[in-house]
Image (tube, grey):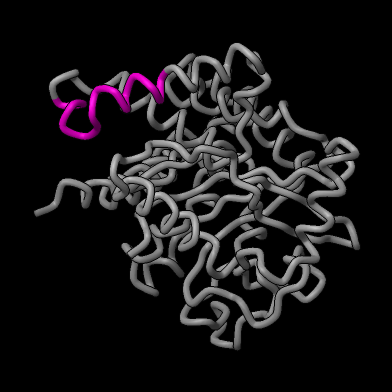
Amino acid sequence: MLPYAAYLRVYEPLSAFSEQERKIWTAYAASRDRPRRATALQAEHGESVRRLLSIPPLPAPAQESPNAYLRRVDDVLYVCPWQSRLRSWLAFSRLRGTTPLKVMDRFLPKAIVEQTADDFDRYKQRGGSAALRTYIHTTTWHVPTAWFVPFDAAERWLVLDGKGADGKPGPAGGNGADQPPTGPQEPGSTTTAPMRNLLYVTSMGQARKRAARALSVIRRYAGEVATAAEVEQVARWLEEFHPHSLVELDYGGLVHLMDDETLRSDQSVAELAAALTGLETGQQELAFAMYQRVILRWKSIQLLESAN
């Protein structure tokens, strides 16, 4: 069973990497042994489980992951490194910062906690703030409202039981998306679409424009509310990457909390866009109604975390 998590990813074009990295990712894309998109989440999850079940448990890998998610558009290769070690360190730090010491000791031996913290501190000292840039953000049990901002409703791709939302067989591309043949695809993959998936993919240029517009509208008509801070965080993160990158929102394991009809009717991106337009045009009731639809939908799913 995959974790009930969603993912916000950035894919940079191969040209954004150093010469050495370009050689590595080019060879990786041509490899037959790398994880394909349809099984990548299972592979990531399996690695994590094996580390935590080992004796002693390992909160983070000893080395950074050599794997990545790949897309190809118009013969341009786009790469989203897994960064399993860095993401594990960041998750460990968040857990350590929010968990009482006595409880933390029940998760991991004290010596392992201290060693992991020391390893992360040395890594940060060597690389500085640039070393903390992550290509993948993860959230459990829900999708944050701000994550819908960079996308448009027309960029929504849905696969149910290996078929597109219209009931036709899903595409052969390994990106797990109900998309036209010319859409972004994983190189070297055939018939690897996952059985269920919902995702959005857009260009970095569009993502930045939409985030900037949303932030402007919210600040102008709603003030400095919590949503404004969340959208600003997403906007600042997007600015860290190559301007010709791709941005992807993947519902990941959350699709298993939602039946087919719920997934078909989930129009969170369109509803949030309507809420912003309502704010901008003075239609306060429309803005409130659309925003509430998004909030209540995801609150009902998030509540499942504590369901008995």
- Front in this rendered view, residue 155 or 12: 12
Q: Where is residue 184 in the image (x, y as percent from the top left)?
A: 76, 63
Question: Looking at the rendering, which quadrant does residue 32 occupy?
Answer: bottom right
Q: In this view, does 33 lie to the left or right of 165?
A: right
The correct choice, above or below, for 100 with respect to 53 in the image is: above
Camera-side residue: 279 or 148? 148
| Residue sitting at x 26%, y 50% | 300
Residue reaching furthest to the bottom:
168
Which residue in the rendered view is the most extreme toward the front?
A: 55
135 relative to 197, above or below: above
Q: In which quarter of the image is the C terminus?
A: bottom left
What x and y, as percent, mark residue 131?
Answer: 65, 23
Residue 62: percent from left, percent from top: 51, 37
Q: Residue at x 31, y 62 (%)?
A: 257
Left or right of 110 in this view: 276: right
Q: How many marks?
A: 0
Q: Residue at x 46, y 63 (%)?
A: 42
Quadrant for the N terminus, please. bottom left
- Expressed as whole percent of the image width and height from the top left, the position of residue 171 reads 67, 80
In the rendered image, residue 116 lying in the magenta stretch gets the answer yes
Q: Is residue 173 magenta?
A: no
The rendered magenta stretch, by its main secondary structure, is classed as helix
Find residue 276 and report its image quarter. top right
Side of 178 relative to 72 (left or right)? left
- Magenta segment, which residues? 103-117
Please give the name of the residue rendered at 32% of the width and 48% of the height, measured from the top-left corner.
54
